[in-house]
Image (tube, grey):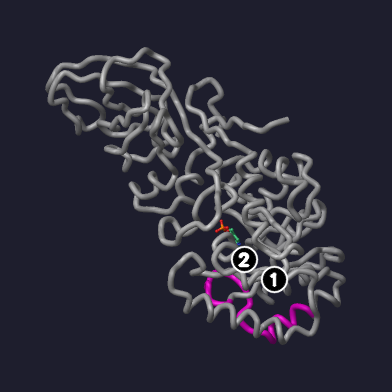
């Protein structure tokens, strides 16, 4: 999708805040801990290339979810280690080798399929994934892990790392977390060969389960200044949201009492009202569910009235404002602010989903000190 560079609707990413958030987490962990920044899904909507360029000197590497995301970083000149956390198609192993991208091996079956192709695999860097209870991908049996290690070593693949992922690190109840941790430690104790890197911590684990830091942490949500638990657990760190979303009024009118606004005529004015239009809609990630939610104009909350269209949305203004007046959808305006978490609460979802769904059509701008 082409990003609309000539539209006032803009996501502004403060890269310094991302750097600050990284430091906040790392300063609480043992000094030798490696930081891996998770920049999958275009760095949760913040822009993977820009975030990776900015963080490159401060992290050990970057985690992506698929090989195309990793290749995007390589082609942008990122030379840091890259790890794809998902299962890549077996026919893409040569690409991983070519671009020096570490891959996740999550089953013996996948590894055997790669070897059966007879392609060159020597030097391929591998992290074995262990499923300790998340239930998505990974080995569940230590004998299979051993077989994988043997096959890797017989084919000169590099056993770089082993890792797992927790399902409930962001929750109050630790029972499932402890069971997964025990399972992972048990797997590790049976390894005949130790890889360079053992890792288990996502943001929530790095923040609320510091005892489980092995060699490295994989930080996503917290880097972007978001609380991975939503509002469940209190954030012990001073993190700063990295992203704001703003636009401006492109149309302002006064309408008579009884006028209807938008598709379906779902909103009818009860008195004379000032209605403003903003160029953002559900194609940008402002979903139709956000009718009734608020935006900020001149430090005041203004309700989204009428249906959210694909490209435009209408708001009720307290008075006439000139065309071009700034509108804040995420961020501070005057004394007030709207957070990503406010959007998530209104949409009954998690903050991750909000930022990931801010579509590529919205232009991104970056703040950093030179
Ligand atoms: C996405 C992901 C992470 C990062 O999770 P956050 O909660 O955003 O820190 C870490 N590890 C794996 C395997 C992931 O898929």
* 301 relative position to 79: left or right: left
Q: How many marks?
A: 2
Residue 58 included in the magenta stretch of the image:
no
- Say which quadrant the N terminus sits in: top right
Residue highlighted by disc 2: 201
Q: Is 223 situated above or below 217?
A: above
Among the two numbered marks 2 and 1 on one chain, the one whose residue lies closer to the N terminus: 2
Q: For the residues marked 2 and 1, what is the alpha-carbon distance in whole angstroms?
A: 8 Å
Who is closer to the viewer here, 30 or 306? Answer: 30
Of helix, strand and loop, which one carries label 2?
strand
The residues colored magenta run: 132-149
Report which quarter residue 103 is drawn in: bottom right
**Residue 18, x across and y down, in percent:** 62, 44
**Residue 200, x across and y down, in percent:** 64, 69
* 313 relative position to 28: left or right: left
Distance from mark 1 CB to nearest ligand 1 atom below 8 Å: no
**Residue 292, x across and y down, in percent:** 27, 38
Quarter of the image where ligand 1 sits: bottom right
Q: Which residue in the rendered view is the most extreme toward the top? A: 322
* 29 relative position to 254: left or right: right
Q: What residue lies at 74% left-to-right and 49% top-to-bottom?
A: 58
Distance from mark 2 CB to nearest ligand 1 atom below 8 Å: yes
Residue highlighted by disc 1: 214
Q: What residue lies at 13% left-to-right and 20% top-to-bottom?
A: 257
Who is closer to the viewer here, 329 or 269? Answer: 329
**Residue 191, x across and y down, in percent:** 75, 83
Cβ atoms under marks 2 and 1 closer than 8 Å: yes
Of helix, strand and loop, which one carries label 1?
loop
Q: What residue lies at 33% left-to-right and 28% top-to-bottom?
A: 300
Check disc 2: other Cα within 10 Å, few if <14, some if 14-19, many if 20+. Answer: many
């Amino acid at each position: 999708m082409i990003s609309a560079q000539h539209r006032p609707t803009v996501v502004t990413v403060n890269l310094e805040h991302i750097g600050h958030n990284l430091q906040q987490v790392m300063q609480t962990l043992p000094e030798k801990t490696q930081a891996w920044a998770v920049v999958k899904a275009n760095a949760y909507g913040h822009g993977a290339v820009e975030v990776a360029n900015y963080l490159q000197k401060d992290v050990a590497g970057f985690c992506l979810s698929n090989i195309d995301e990793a290749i995007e970083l390589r082609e942008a000149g990122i030379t840091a280690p890259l790890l794809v956390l998902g299962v890549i198609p077996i026919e893409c192993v040569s690409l991983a080798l070519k671009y020096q991208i570490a891959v996740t091996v999550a089953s013996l079956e996948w590894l055997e399929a790669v070897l059966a192709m007879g392609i060159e695999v020597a030097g391929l860097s591998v992290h074995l994934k262990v499923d300790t209870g998340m239930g998505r991908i990974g080995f569940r049996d230590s004998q299979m892990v051993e077989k994988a290690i043997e096959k890797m070593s017989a084919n000169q693949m590099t056993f770089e790392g082993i890792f797992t992922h927790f399902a409930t690190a962001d929750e109050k109840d630790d029972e499932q977390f402890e069971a997964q941790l025990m399972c992972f430690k048990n797997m590790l104790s049976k390894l005949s060969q130790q890889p360079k890197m053992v890792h288990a911590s996502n943001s929530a684990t790095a923040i609320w389960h510091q005892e489980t830091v092995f060699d490295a942490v994989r930080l996503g949500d917290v880097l972007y200044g978001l609380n991975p638990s939503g509002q469940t657990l209190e954030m012990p760190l001073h993190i700063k949201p990295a992203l704001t979303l703003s636009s401006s009024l492109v149309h302002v009118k006064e309408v008579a009492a009884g006028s209807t606004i938008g598709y379906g005529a779902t909103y009818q004015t009860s008195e004379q009202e000032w209605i403003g239009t903003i160029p953002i809609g559900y194609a940008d990630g402002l979903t139709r569910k956000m009718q009734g939610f608020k935006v900020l104009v001149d430090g005041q909350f203004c309700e989204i009235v009428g249906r959210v269209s694909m490209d435009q949305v209408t708001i009720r203004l307290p008075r006439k404002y000139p065309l071009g007046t700034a509108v804040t959808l995420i961020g501070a305006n005057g004394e007030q602010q709207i957070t990503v978490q406010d959007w998530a609460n209104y949409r009954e979802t998690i903050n991750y989903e909000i930022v990931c769904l801010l579509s590529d059509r919205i232009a991104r701008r970056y703040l950093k000190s030179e």
